[in-house]
Amino acid sequence: MSRGRPRLFDENEALETALHLFWRHGYEGTSISMLAKAMGMTVPSLYNAFGNKQSLFMKAVGCYDLYGEKLYDAAFAKTSAREVALAILMGEVDLVSGADTPEGCLMVQGALATGPESEPLRQEMARQRRRAQVDVATRFEEFQQAGQLPPGWTASSLAAYVMTVATGIAVQAKGGASRQELIQIVDMAIGMWPKGQG
């Protein structure tokens, strides 16, 4: 019995290629023909391997999540709220200004502007961003319960602030801001911390 023809491509490598295209051009700006050409596949073989464009995009998002997991795992290991916030923001700078990664953030710009038929993707990206903010708030809650946040600060508002700045960093990077300019944004954001607090 025939065991079938082996795949002539590396799936992980193909997904990484798709990820970088979606990351650079967004969901709407990346066509199936662009994807197939970059991945070294025909359009029919791409559909056969990954399903439709939405399915491929979500699989690419799964690859992108690995970048985020590494960033947040490292940040959450820090021992003060200020250090956590700084690690998140500098991790974002590293991610959006790295030599091997496109400018900007897939989770912010990848499916931000989509047509009606792609509304489920936009909603899913928004849901994942909200989930990340909840995770950050949960970590800050530990510091709040220990009395380590500045007076009047709450875990939820601090998480919203940090994630808003992180999103802004991604947008600035996409607009051409240099790494040094992004670091200056982080310095200003962290500078609002009261001296000697958290």
Image: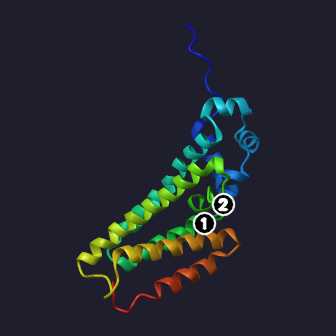
Helix or strand or loop: what does disc 2 sit on?
loop
Residue 81 seen in this snapshot: yes
Counting from the top left corner in percent of width and height, residue 60 is at: 58, 47
For marks 2 and 1, the one nearer the N-term is: 1
Q: Residue at x 54, y 53 (%)?
A: 64
The 10 Å Cα crowd at callout 1, few under 14, some 14 to 19, many 20 or more, is many
Residue 7: image tag:
none
| Vertical placement of residue 129 versus 22, above or below | below
Counting from the top left corner in percent of width and height, residue 91 is at: 50, 68
Amino acid type assigned to the residue bearing label 1 in the image: Val
Q: Which residue is mark 1?
A: 96
User: On the rendered structure, is 133 left or right of 48?
Assistant: left
**Depth check, front residue: 162 or 92:** 162
Q: Which residue is mark 2?
A: 102
Number of numbered labels in the structure image: 2
Q: Residue at x 59, y 16 (%)?
A: 4
Q: Quadrant of residue 36?
A: top right
Residue 13 seen in this snapshot: no
